[in-house]
Image (cartoon, rainbow, N blue to C red):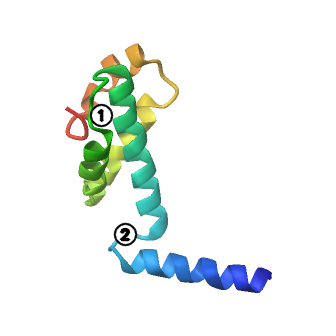
Amino acid sequence: MKAKMLVLFTLVIAAVAACGKDDPITAIDRTTDCRDICHRYQECIQSNYDVDECTNHCTDMVSSDETSKIDDCQDCIDDKSCTASGFNCLVECAGIVP
């Protein structure tokens, strides 16, 4: 059973890797971070904000500089209140959310 699961896991990782130039872990991390960033913007700033459109825009940011910007934004807003993250993370999150 473990061998079958390992083969399945390997095939899934290979399929994901074949879909883009990022390694699967980076792509998953970016998608998760983008969703969190966009959802936080909706929660704290604009209740009718389109999280799906924002997430798609954010996940399309694939250069290493853009990936670093996503990481910096996520690190900045992580575990902060809406007030703290909204005022303290403007520079880190500019270009990802308005």
* Relative side of 76 to 58, left or right: right
Question: In the figure, residue 41 lies in which quadrant?
Answer: top left
The residue to which callout 1 is attached is 92
Please indicate whether residue 9 sits to the left or right of residue 81 in the image. Answer: right
Residue 67 position, x and y percent, is: 33, 53
Residue type at mark 2 is Asp
Q: Residue at 33%, 26% (x, y): give it.
A: 89
Q: Residue furthest right?
A: 1
* Residue 96 spot, x, y in % from top left: 25, 40
Q: Which mark is residue 38?
A: none
Residue 1 vs residue 79, the one in the foreground: 1
Badge 2 crowding class, 10 Å Cα cut-off, few under 14, some 14 to 19, many 20 or more, is some
Q: Residue at x 78, y 80 (%)?
A: 2
Q: Amino acid at mark 1?
A: Glu
Q: Residue 20 at what x, y percent from top left? A: 33, 73
Which residue occupies 27% across, 26% down? 90
Is the residue 59 above or below the residue 36 in the image? below
Q: What separation in Å lies between label 1 and label 2 (alpha carbons)?
A: 22 Å
Q: Which mark is residue 22?
A: 2
Q: Tag 2 or tag 1, which sits nearer the N-term?
A: 2
Q: Quadrant of the N terminus?
A: bottom right
Q: Quadrant of the C terminus?
A: top left
Tell me the crowding category of disc 1: few under 14, some 14 to 19, or many 20 or more residues within 10 angstroms, Cα based. Answer: some
Q: Residue 52, image x and y in percent?
A: 31, 45
12 or 61, which lies in front? 12
Q: Nearer the viewer, residue 50 or 36?
A: 50
Question: Closer to us: mark 1 or mark 2?
Answer: 2
Q: Is residue 92 left or right of residue 31?
A: left
